[in-house]
Image: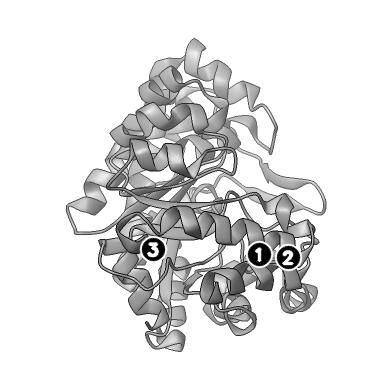
Amino acid sequence: MEKRQRFLAALEGRQVDRPPVWLMRQAGRYLPGYRAVREKHGFWDVCHNPELSTQVALEPLKRFELDAAIVFSDILIVPQAMDLDVTFGKGEGPQIAKTLKTEADLAAWNTKGLVERLKFMPNAVSHLRDTLKGSHGILGFAGAPFTLFAYITEGQGSDEFKAARVMLHENPALAKKALATLGDCVAELLEAECQAGADIVQLFDTWGGLLTAEEYAQFCVPAIRRITDQLHSRGRKVLLFARGGHHLLPVLADTGADGFSLDWRTSYTEARARFPNAILQGNIDPVLLFSKPATVAAATRDLVGKMMPHHGGSKNIVNLGHGIMVGTPPENVKAMVDAVAHG
């Protein structure tokens, strides 16, 4: 099968010769071409320039037999477009100057005309689509409401996001209002990406796993439903990745997502038993890509073997359980992808 044909068939539950494969963060710092681009251009410049975004997105497709490309951008473009002063200090991670603490802070969010300020993202999708000419599937993406809320409330990256989690309990009304607002903003952005040519979009809830299942059901599910309901009304499909979210499996179905990207700590077999009709994506441990190529290939073949009995591999996508890590040997990425493509 052709790559995009295989990708779309898997999404739709039609027959495939094998599961398609793409990798989260497949265009990143582990590739020399990406590092060369970044030596000349700042991170935001790459995100905002469709030609540079496409150049970076294409590099892994040239090296590996991947079935889909994901547009190159960042989840924090939404708070950036809301005029919250998002910056990336060298070696410090993201910094957000205008944090969320009060109702007044929320009222100051600049959400009017948001998609117009974010038009570089759908422009990047359409540029990638025109360049690929139908050869590969295309994914768009955005940050999920809670993960964006966590950064905006904390003002920076964190392992615990204490300020965000405390607000859920101390000021749940403000938290829910902020999450609903972010849900509507994200839905608008993802629809623009779909109109520009994305075959499917993925929500990255990188920090959703910090919450209990009860907290996730109370705060995150309604915000995500605002996104999935709006996109479903236009015939779109949405994947959800909740990192560290094994304990969230019982409530994830309530989000309305069409499929789930599985963390490497979640059993594919368990998830498939719970979600027999959903698209499942994942879930090889990114750390495994630092082992020997033969080890990588064996683990990948094992995962494909588990996927194939489900309608011949349909509604399955081979991926990592999180993004490719800095320093990953490209030859090990090739070993993984080749094990999917050639067995």
Tell me the crowding category of disc 1: few under 14, some 14 to 19, or many 20 or more residues within 10 angstroms, Cα based.
many
Q: Secondary structure at mark 1?
A: helix
Furthest toward the top, the residue is 170
Q: Is residue 124 left or right of residue 289?
A: left
In the picture, the disc for residue 129 is none
CB under 8 Å between discs 1 and 3: no
- Rendering coords of residue 283 (x, y %): 55, 50
Question: Which one is earlier in the sequence, the residue at label 1 or at label 3?
Answer: 3
CB under 8 Å between discs 1 and 2: yes
Q: Secondary structure at mark 2?
A: helix
- Rendering coords of residue 266 (x, y %): 53, 38
* Res 112 seen here: no
Label 3 sits on residue: 116
Label 1 sits on residue: 297
Q: Is residue 323 left or right of residue 31?
A: left
Tell me the crowding category of disc 3: few under 14, some 14 to 19, or many 20 or more residues within 10 angstroms, Cα based.
few
Tell me the crowding category of disc 2: few under 14, some 14 to 19, or many 20 or more residues within 10 angstroms, Cα based.
few
Label 2 sits on residue: 294
Q: Is residue 323 above or below residue 164?
A: below
CB under 8 Å between discs 3 and 2: no
